[in-house]
Image: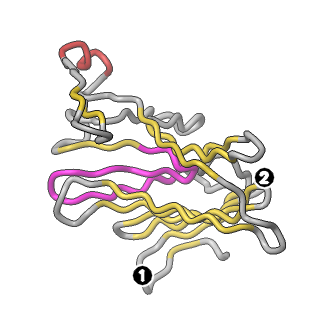
């Protein structure tokens, strides 16, 4: 994949690898009028509602060297027990920051992985599409996808001290609401 800006769709495309890194950290801001997120070239990101500084849902480290995530996508192979942090487990990957989306493609042992982050145009919903394909000549394996977040819920971690969370069980086998 070639690096640079694509005049046809406004994408900034580049490949990451041991010898290939962008000259500066790249973060894509994806937002609608009241909600948004940012995604870095290594899949780290954060989300906010209303105001990206004052109303952070998950934190952003603003550390270009470590690119510490506040949100994680973890792929767990049920057959082998191995787990990978998606976006951070592969040294080589193709990245495209587009208007309204970020896409990544890379390989893990026996797998081809594609990720795509978007934000709904109207509602406060961050969407992450994960495509998994068995590598050519490899059989499919049972996998589990886990998502985790470090809750910020304000401008800094001190703002969380005033947040009260209670759990509500729904009837039957419904979700647990917080």
Q: Secondary structure at mark 2?
A: loop
Q: Is residue 59 left or right of residue 120?
A: right
* Residue 175 sits above or below residue 99 on the image: above
What residue appears at the point 53 percent right and 50 percent down from the top-left corner? 43
Mark 1 surroundings within 10 Å by alpha-carbon count, few (fewer than 14), some (14 through 19), many (20 or more): few
Q: Is residue 93 left or right of residue 116?
A: right
The image shows a total of numbered marks equal to 2
Q: Secondary structure at mark 1?
A: loop
- Estimate the spatial distance between the alpha carbons at disc 2 and disc 1, rounded to whole Å: 28 Å
Location of residue 127 in the rendering, given as x and y in whole percent from the top left corner: 36, 58
Mark 2 surroundings within 10 Å by alpha-carbon count, few (fewer than 14), some (14 through 19), many (20 or more): few
In which image quadrant can residue 114 be found?
bottom right
Residue that numbered label 1 is attached to: 9
* Residue 115 sits above or below residue 4 on the image: above
- Quadrant of the rendering where the N terminus is positioned: bottom right
Mark number displayed over residue 18: 2
What residue appears at the point 79 percent right and 55 percent down from the top-left corner? 109
Location of residue 48 in the rendering, given as x and y in whole percent from the top left corner: 26, 42
């Amino acid at each position: 994949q070639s690096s640079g800006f694509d005049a046809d769709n406004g994408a900034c495309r580049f490949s990451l690898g041991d010898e290939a890194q962008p000259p500066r950290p790249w973060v894509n801001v994806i937002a609608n009028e009241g909600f948004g997120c940012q995604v870095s070239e290594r899949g780290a990101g954060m989300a906010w509602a209303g105001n990206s500084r004052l109303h952070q849902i998950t934190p952003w480290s603003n550390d270009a060297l470590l690119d510490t995530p506040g949100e994680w996508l973890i792929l767990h192979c049920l057959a082998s027990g191995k787990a990978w942090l998606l976006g951070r487990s592969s040294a080589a990957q193709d990245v495209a920051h587009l208007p309204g989306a970020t896409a990544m493609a890379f390989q893990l042992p026996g797998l081809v992985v594609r990720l795509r982050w978007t934000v709904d145009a109207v509602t406060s919903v961050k969407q992450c599409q994960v495509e998994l394909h068995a590598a050519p000549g490899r059989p499919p394996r049972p996998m589990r996808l886990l998502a985790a977040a470090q809750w910020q819920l304000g401008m800094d971690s001190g703002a969380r001290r005033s947040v009260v969370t209670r759990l509500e069980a729904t009837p039957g086998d419904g979700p647990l609401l917080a």
